[in-house]
Amino acid sequence: VRSDTRRSRWAEEAVRRTVAPLVELSGDLMGDLGGKDEDAPELIAVGRTRPDDLSRVDMREDSLLVVFDRPTSPGNLGTLIRSADAFGAVGVVVTGHAADVYDPRTVRASTGSLFAVPTLHVDTPQVLDWVAGLRRRGTPVRVVGTDEAGPVDLSRTGLTGPIALVLGNETTGMSAAWRGACDILVAIPVGGAASSLNAAAAGSIVLYEAA
């Protein structure tokens, strides 16, 4: 909490109700922590993140899961989480060396969807083992990869049933492990001078098509 200004009624109520330890800091320090040059926040909460446990994902017969392999841009990751929320995905799984799910830029780009959609960072082998387990238990998950050179046009693909939609790194695409795990590779036909689409934009298009 800020020590050098009178707090608003909202902030006073939050302070009164909290059971967490309170630390008073100057406005300058609060501004640094809050990432703002002006108008430092009145309160900053430090919280424990939820565990990256795949049991948080409720994969059923009609579920759509998004897998983002090694994203480098927090903005792209946050935007994709926002689209996953908008189009009814049951979760977003980030794999490999990747942007931080809780990077402030990721959080801002998600516009709050990060707190509505289970979003995890899990190793690729763990996700593939989880998918195999779902299949053994009778949930026929299909792994659908996106690739600008994919042999199947997106509009000709039936995106029904339980699906794990895989999007690759913005520069190099999917890893060899994910490419080998895909049941089908789909491409979004594009025109004009663009050779490809931004990863978050491509993911949003596929999510919309599936929805």
Image (tube, helix red, strand yellow):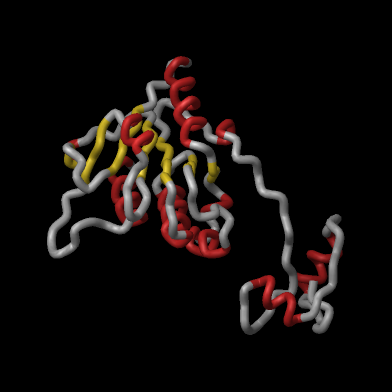
Q: Residue 77: horizontal and vertical position, in percent?
A: 45, 55
Q: Is 99 displayed left or right of 169 in the figure?
A: right
Q: Residue 111: horizontal and vertical position, in percent?
A: 51, 61
Q: Residue 37: horizontal and vertical position, in percent?
A: 62, 82
Q: Residue 39: horizontal and vertical position, in percent?
A: 66, 82
Q: Is 131 displayed left or right of 43 in the figure?
A: left
Residue at coordinates 53% horizontally, 45% vertically from top-left? 119
In the image, is residue 37 above or below residue 191? below
Q: Quadrant of residue 138?
A: top left
Q: Quadrant of residue 151?
A: top left
Q: Nearer the viewer, residue 92 or 86?
A: 92
Residue at coordinates 86% horizontally, 59% vertically from top-left? 21
Locate the N terminus by quadrant.
bottom right
In the image, is residue 181 above or below residue 91? above
Numbered label tally: 0
Locate the C terminus by quadrant.
top left
Residue at coordinates 45% horizontally, 62% vertically from top-left? 75
Q: Is 189 displayed left or right of 132 in the figure?
A: left
Q: Quadrant of residue 11?
A: bottom right
Q: Is 211 displayed left or right of 126 in the figure?
A: left
In the image, is residue 122 above or below residue 116? above
Residue at coordinates 22% horizontally, 48% vertically from top-left? 148
